[in-house]
Every structure is written in C-alpha cells, then in structure tokens.
Image (cartoon, rainbow, N blue to C red):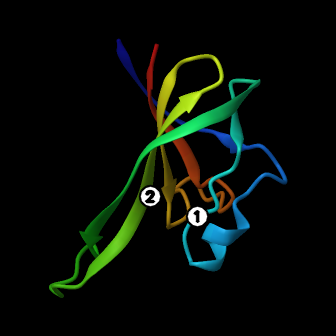
C-alpha cells in the first residue's frame, strides 16, 4: 500500500554524500528524521530527475527542479523522497528534502 505524505524531512546531520555534492547533485544522506523518528537508508532503488520551464516565461529553456530517490529504509518500508533545487515557498531556505510517498 502506498500513502501520499508530501512532508518535509530532515537529513541525518553529517551523513551527506560529499562525492555527489562535488558533481553538483544533492548529497543523499544515510538517513532522515521524519515525525521525530530517525530512519536509515538501506538501499537506493531508483534515481531520477524532474525538469520544467521557468514559470511565466516564454523561453523554451528547461530547469532542473527536483531530484527523486526511491529508497528502501531500515524498517522495510519504501520511501520516495525528493530534493527541491529551489527553496521552499515557506521562506525557509533550509527545507529542501521532502518525503513524497511511503509504501509499507
């Protein structure tokens, strides 16, 4: 069963993939904190990107918007998370990681 969550999550501090960050990609951490619980990533199942045109512009240029990851977590669940290339509209530039769906 897949549940839509669409909530911000916090990366476990100090666990970012520095190699990916050196390539200009998000540094997927080793886990996340969601609703007060820490969850470890066991396996990366799939990775993809989402691009879109700049809002309100007639230009045909595409911009990379999100990096998606399908992850097997330590508790056996499968998460789909994404990293937003632009800061959240809430005004908090630190919120970049979101839990999109959870499969139990």
Image height of 39 relative to 58, above or below: above
Q: Residues within 10 Å of mark 2 (few under 14, many from 20)?
A: some
Image x and y of residue 103, in percent: 43, 19
Point 59% across, 55% down: residue: 96
Mark 1, secondary structure of its residue: loop
Point 42% across, 59% down: residue: 66
Q: Is residue 92 left or right of residue 53?
A: right
Image x and y of residue 43, in percent: 56, 37
Residue contact at pointers 1 and 2, CB within 8 angstroms: yes
Image x and y of residue 14, in percent: 84, 54
Whole-number angstrom distance, CA of label 1 to CA of label 2: 8 Å
Image x and y of residue 47, in percent: 41, 52
Query: Residue 46's quadrant in the figure?
Result: top left
What is the quadrant of the N terminus in the image? top left
Mark 2, secondary structure of its residue: strand
Q: Is residue 4 left or right of residue 36?
A: left
Q: How many badges with numbers are in the image?
A: 2
Circle 2 residue: 67
Point 76% across, 24% down: residue: 36
Q: Residues within 10 Å of mark 1 (few under 14, many from 20)?
A: many
Q: Mark number for residue 26?
A: 1
Q: Mark number for residue 9?
A: none
Dot placed on the residue nearer the N-terminal end, 1 or 2: 1
Point 56% across, 17% down: residue: 76
Report the front residue among 5 and 75. Answer: 75
Image height of 6 relative to 1, above or below: below
Image height of 56 relative to 13, above or below: below
């Amino acid at each position: 069963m897949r549940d839509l969550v669409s909530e911000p999550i916090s990366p476990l501090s100090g666990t970012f993939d520095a190699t990916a960050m050196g390539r200009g990609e998000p540094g997927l951490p080793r886990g996340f904190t969601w609703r007060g619980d820490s969850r470890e990533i066991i396996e990366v199942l799939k990775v993809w990107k989402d691009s879109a045109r700049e809002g309100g512009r007639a230009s045909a240029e595409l911009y990379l918007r999100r990096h998606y990851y399908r992850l097997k977590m330590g508790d056996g669940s499968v998460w789909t998370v994404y990293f937003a290339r632009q800061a959240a509209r809430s005004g908090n530039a630190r919120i970049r990681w979101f839990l999109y769906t959870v499969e139990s």
